[in-house]
Image (spheres, rainbow, N blue to C red):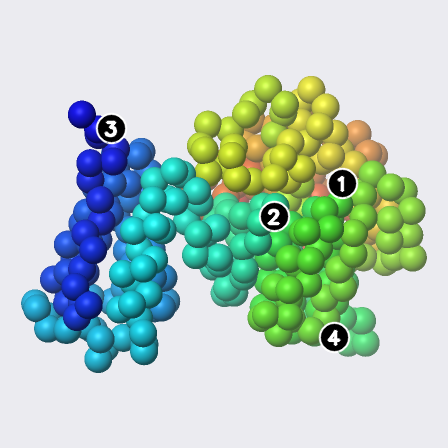
Amino acid sequence: MGDARTERSVPAGPAALTADDLRRAVRAAEGILVEAGVPSARHDAEALAAWSLGLPRLEWYRLPAGDAPLAPALPAGATDRFLADYAGAVERRRGREPLQRIVGHTVFRHVTVEVLDDVFVPRPETETVAQVAIDEAARLLGDPARADRPPLVVDLCCGSGVIGISVDVEVPGSRVVAVDLSPDAVRATTANAARVGSGTQRTLVGDVGDPALLAELDGTVDVVVSNPPYIPPDAVPVDPEVRDHDPDLALYGRGADGLEVPRAVVRAAVRLLRPGGLFVMEHAEVQAADVRAAARAADAFVEVRTLTDLTGRDRMVVARRAGAAGDPGSPHGRGRMDP
């Protein structure tokens, strides 16, 4: 008797694929993904079907009903691509390959970026981190006293570049510098910036622990933002999508507590930020107190606080570089001052 996992399969539809054929295929795919433990089985089954048909999403109401052929409502050749690709895509997802890696892209805030091999897949939780940086850049851009000084934002450990690109796209006129230790990540950031028309982005390979990194910008940066690796070595992620497919360099923050890289980011922010500049960095929920302590230990920040993500979890530290002439205001969002 065969493995139960292989007994269910996506039906191979006829050449004249109908809406009913598509619905049956998606239902079968959903069942396969449920059995594999995929938490978003229905969503992923539909997303993979849309990708296989060359569509951005499945909009059932736009498709013919019943046994009417789908071909007239789809891009040329889409039926052939579906028959060839859908079963294979579902099989890959059943093996817990991330949806974003299969389809080759993901949406982050208002931009669609490519997901490349050996580069961290952006997470929705990081959109809140980006929002803090975006709000600060927008505030500075609107300050009449800074009319000749566009906001300068540095994105450390940039990965696929989504934070810096979002700042550039949502606050036109900002200047963004993105840095990562991984040449693959820097290539991905460069490609994604070009893809979305981000025109002020500078990218480079660099180590946040290097005191000479961006030394020419010391004391001039308005915002330092980062989503660094921060997982401790003994906290291997449970989800196969993360554990088996995201690069270790983007996951594990080194040191027994996973905070060696984040502490290096703190030191870089101290050096790069101008007085009054804003620092925001993502971390794990359980690391909030330790990260606040690291920021305070630098003896260079005021208003050190933890902010929550959209699910209400403590996920980022926010602080102001000391030495400002006046209080420029706090970033909004629920936060807790360091005791």
For the C terminus, give its image quadrant.
Answer: top right
In the picture of the structure, the residue carrying the numbered disc 3 is: 3
In the picture of the structure, the residue carrying the numbered disc 2 is: 119
Task: Report, in whole angstroms, how far the alpha carbon at label 2 lies from the one at label 4.
Answer: 39 Å
Disc 1 + disc 2, Cβ < 8 Å? no
Q: Is mark 2 on a helix, strand or loop?
A: loop
Q: Which residue lies furthest to the front in this view?
A: 1
Q: In which quarter of the image is residue 197?
A: bottom right
Circle 1 packing at 10 Å, graded few (<14), some (14-19), many (20+), is many
Q: Which of marks 2 and 4 is in front?
A: 2
Numbered label attached to residue 44: none
Vertical side of 153 occupied by 307: above or below: above
Task: Report, in whole angstroms, how far the alpha carbon at label 1 lies from the one at label 2.
Answer: 19 Å
In the picture of the structure, the residue carrying the numbered disc 4 is: 144
Q: Nearer the viewer, mark 4 or mark 1?
A: 1
Vertical side of 333 occupied by 79: above or below: below
Disc 1 + disc 3, Cβ < 8 Å? no
Q: Nearer the viewer, mark 4 or mark 3?
A: 3
Q: Is mark 4 on a helix, strand or loop?
A: helix
* Image location (x, y in percent) of residue 55: 34, 68
Task: Report, in whole angstroms, how far the alpha carbon at label 4 lies from the one at label 3.
Answer: 68 Å
First along the sequence among labels 4 and 1: 4
Task: Report, in whole angstroms, how far the alpha carbon at label 1 lies from the one at label 3.
Answer: 48 Å
Q: Quadrant of residue 150?
A: bottom right
User: Which one is nearer the viewer's eye here, 108 or 220?
Assistant: 108
Give the residue type at disc 4.
Pro
In the picture of the structure, the residue carrying the numbered disc 1 is: 265
Q: Nearer the viewer, mark 1 or mark 3?
A: 3
